[in-house]
Image: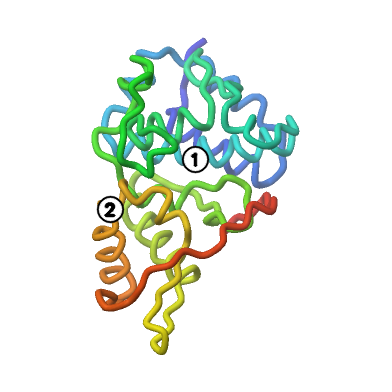
Amino acid sequence: MKNFKSLLTLSETLLLTVKLKKDSSEIEQELSAFSLTELYSQLSIDREKNTFWINIYNAYFQILASRDHTQGKQIFKSKAIIIAQTYFSLDEIEHGVLRKYRWKKSLGYLPNLFASSLIRKLAVHAVDYRIHFALNCGAKSCPPIAFYTLDKLDQQLDDAMYSFLSSETTINSVTKTIQTSKLLFWYQGDFGGLKGVRNMLKTVLNIENSSYALKYKYYSWEPQLENYI
């Protein structure tokens, strides 16, 4: 089967189709028909990898939750996503490819020593921590879903980061406390540790926070699908 559309184009089309609640099976078949060689060649640099896999993750979470009714932890572990004749899970996409095979429960500090050679080959060269403001796992406290394109990726990720941090961060000048999303705690290693988290808040939100205590808000796992921008 000859593929006329690029993987990047198909990832955008898939997400739009899911948003419009149309049948996405034909697009899923096109994505599955690519070879691994084509996957490697079309997604050779980090910008291409981030664009493609963010769109795929967000589209397939909606597909698995809405159409396939996969729930709980299983939705992240189930290898139900077929790309280039290969089965992937949401966890493999997020923690394997986009986070360069970080161990899920290490706060971003340790590699997953059991990551497959395939995941290692597909993974980004350097983790872009802004992905955490782009991936949506169907919970109320998750960032909303946007459509990412290769030519505008940097600006789109910057916008997603600013929007999410602005909405999730509160400052109490009386108690000298800053509260922000627990995502910044769970993945603090990706952000460069606690110092990196503070620097990001200072840079993105113009918050001088060195004398403030940093606390994290309760993360609501209440389901909220179809949270599109």
Please tell me whether residue 188 is drawn above or below residue 92 in the rendered image.
below
Please tell me whether residue 124 is drawn above or below residue 85 in the rendered image.
below
Would you identify the image quadrant in which residue 158 lies? bottom left
Q: Which tag, 1 or 2, sits closer to the chain's start?
A: 1
- Disc 1 is placed on an element classified as helix
Horizontal relation, residue 124 to residue 103: left or right = left
Mark 1 crowdedness (10 Å alpha carbons): few <14, some 14-19, many ≥20: many
Residue 2, horizontal then vertical, whole percent: 48, 13
Residue 222, horizontal then vertical, whole percent: 69, 54
Q: CA distance from mark 1 to mark 2?
A: 27 Å
* Furthest residue toward bottom: 174
Query: Which one is closest to the eye, mark 1 or mark 2?
Result: 2
Would you identify the image quadrant in which residue 51 lies? top left
Horizontal relation, residue 202 to residue 61: left or right = left
Mark 2 crowdedness (10 Å alpha carbons): few <14, some 14-19, many ≥20: some
- The residue that disc 1 covers is 55
Residue sitting nearer the eye, 193 or 207: 193
Residue 226, horizontal then vertical, whole percent: 66, 51
Residue ID at (65%, 46%): 19
- Disc 2 is placed on an element classified as helix
Dot 2 amino acid type: Gly
Residue ID at (67%, 33%): 64
Total marks placed:
2
- The residue that disc 2 covers is 193
Q: Quadrant of the C terminus?
A: bottom right
Residue ID at (40%, 14%): 36
Dot 1 amino acid type: Asn
